[in-house]
Structures are given as C-alpha cells and as structure tokens.
Image: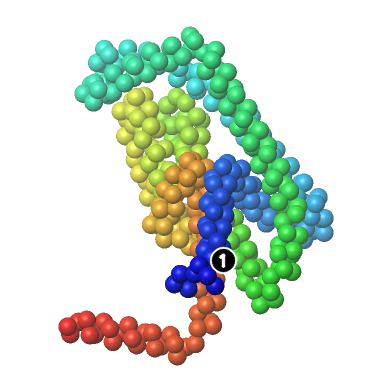
Amino acid sequence: MEGSAGGWSIRKVLFVEVVTLGMVFGAALLWTLRHLLLELLVSLVLAIVAEPAIKLLVRFKMRRSMSVVVVFTLLLGLVAVVIFVLSVPIYHGIANVIVRLPSLVKSIESHKGQLASVLVKLHIETYLQTSSVKVTQLITSAANPAFLAAKRVLSTIVNLIAIFILSVFISLEGPAIVRGVLTVVPTERAYLVRRVVDETSRGVTRYVLGNLLTSIIGGVVVSVSLSFLGVSYAPLLGLWVALVDLLPLVGGLLAGVPTVLIALIHSTTAGVVMLIVFIAYQQIENHVLNPLVFSRAVKLNPFWILFAVLVGDQLAHLEGALLAIPVASGLQVIGRVVWEEYSKRLPKSSTDNLLTKDEDQRESDIHS
C-alpha cells in the first residue's frame, strides 16, 4: 500500500492515533469524574463489608432484598446513635476550647509553671497567641465562614446519603451483576473471576472490620485514661484518636501528638502518663493487632501498605488514604491469580531452563 513506511501503513498509523486519542480522552474523563468514582468506590467497600451480615440473614430463610433493608437500616441506626451520643460532649468540648483559649494564652504569657517555660522556649506561645486572636476574630465576624461551613456540611451530608443509597443498590444488584459477568466470561475463566471476587471481598471485609476494631479500642483506651487523669475533653479526644487511627501505620502518631500535648497542658503528670499509654498501646497495636489485621486480611507487606497510603493521599487526600489498602488488596489478588494461572500454563521444562540459564549467567559473571 502506498504511503507505508517501515511496514507502517496509513491504516495502522490512523489506528494508533485513534487509540491514543481514546486513551487520552478516557484518562481525562476519569480525572473529571474522580469524585464520583471515589464515591462509587466507597459505596462498593461499604456493600462488601455488609455482605457477610446479609448472607447470614439469607441463610435464615430471609429474602435477600429484605436482608439488605434490615442490615442497612441497622447500620444507619447505629451511626445515628453514635452521633447522638457523641454530639453533646463534642459540642461542649469545642465550646470550652474556644472559651478557654485566651486564658490559656495568658497563663503561658505569664510564664507560670514548668510547661509554660518549655512552650516559651519553643516559641509556641507566639503561635497560640496568634491563633487566639484569629479565633476571636472568627467568632466576631462569623457570618460568612458560618455560611461556608454550613454549605460544606450540607454537601457532605448529601454525599453521604448518595453513598448510602449506592451501597444499597450495589448490595441488591451485586449478585445479579456478578452472574451476568460470569455468563459472558468463558467457562475456563469464570472460576478465576469468581475467585478474584471472593478473595477480594473477604480481604476487604476483614481489613475494614479489623481496622474499625483497633481504632475503637484506641479511642476507648485514650478516653478512659484521660477521664481517669481528670483531663478535659476526654470524649472529644477519644473520638479524635479513633478517627485518626483509621489511617494505617501513621494514624497513631498523628493522633498521639496533640493528645499528649493537651494532657501536658493539664499537668505534667497527665502528659507523662498519656505518653506512656500511647507508647504501650502503639506497641500492642503494631505487634499484636495490626499483624492480625494486615497480614491475615490483606496479606500486604508494610512497605506496600505505606506506599499505597501515600499514593491514595496524593490522589484523593483522606478518602484516598483510607481506601488505599482495600484497593491495593484487590490488585494484589488479581496479580496473584493471574500469576498462578500463568505458572500453571508454563511448561515445567521451560521454567527449569530459565532457572538454569539464570544460574549459568550468574556463575559466568562471578568468574569474569
């Protein structure tokens, strides 16, 4: 054909250009819809976590549609109860922090106490004084910020409702979708698809439930310890620790630093005790709880866990960091299944020849 160069015909060039443009357009479309895709991914994870409870009710002869309604209604009620129980102490805690911040700054400015002298040397009192002024200005002219905050809260509530509804529909239609995919996939591949779906859902469920359990334990330990020491805002700080500890590996450190500082402001003894409590709990969590959660649930190396969290944070901030490990677990399952299938099809003689060639090459490199 005329116009060909080096075996590349005009038709091939046009095909490559169309494919390239399609890939660029697809990438741009995915980036534009990234927030929607993130909500869909959160909904999928929530539906996967709810699936064991739904299957349990189905075993008791309850229809799947009714099981989905019961499970998600109970989940919604549990969230509402938690919010209702924690809303009052959180509100009073935040109000007390705002009210007591100016007096705290004055106490530090007067250089009273051992903690105050340390804060003065570290120039933290300047930062607190500036923050106090900003908080006061924010309270006195809070019309616009309050409107923006209300708008943001309303947007968050709408997103949460959308995620909840999507999760319900995924739980209702998920089995039918999987069956539809399996009918299209060739018979020899259907088993692999089913295996990937089952292993991924099992790993994600174990990880999410295990991570929630360790976070709740951490929040309860901190809240009880602070209450025993007489530190103010114990429920608020316990909730802070429970939420931040959801972040794998780095959550404990991020939660511990401000909590210990607030306990140190209350008294030196409280600060030292809370530091010991955090160190002890982190050792238990890192060497006992987390290995049970990460190693058995998602089977990921700690390096890849940290790498996945950092990538998720760069792509989608906090939501991406929280979803990074479930996504990485799913990708790992896919890679493992594909590799096992490839290894089965690879003749044993070919594998032995490859190993022999590698050993011969290493020996020649050593002798040379």
Q: Measuring 48% from the left and 62% from the top, which residue is drawn there?
A: 299
Which residue, as the protein is rendered here, is positioned at the far left?
368
Please say if 276 is above or below 184: above
Q: Where's residue 20, x and y in %?
A: 52, 57
Q: Would residue 4 be seen by someone viewing this image from the given angle?
A: yes
Residue underneath mark 1: 11
Q: Measuring 50% from the left and 73% from the top, which residue is drawn there?
A: 339
Near-viewer residue (51 or 328): 328
Q: Would residue 246 be seen by someone viewing this image from the given angle?
A: no
Please say if 243 is above or below 120: below
Q: Measuring 38% from the left and 13% from the top, which residue is drawn there?
A: 133
- The quarter of the image holding the C terminus is bottom left
Mark 1 is on which residue type? Arg
Q: Where's residue 4, x and y in %?
A: 49, 69
- The quarter of the image holding the N terminus is bottom right
Please say if 336 is above or below 236: below
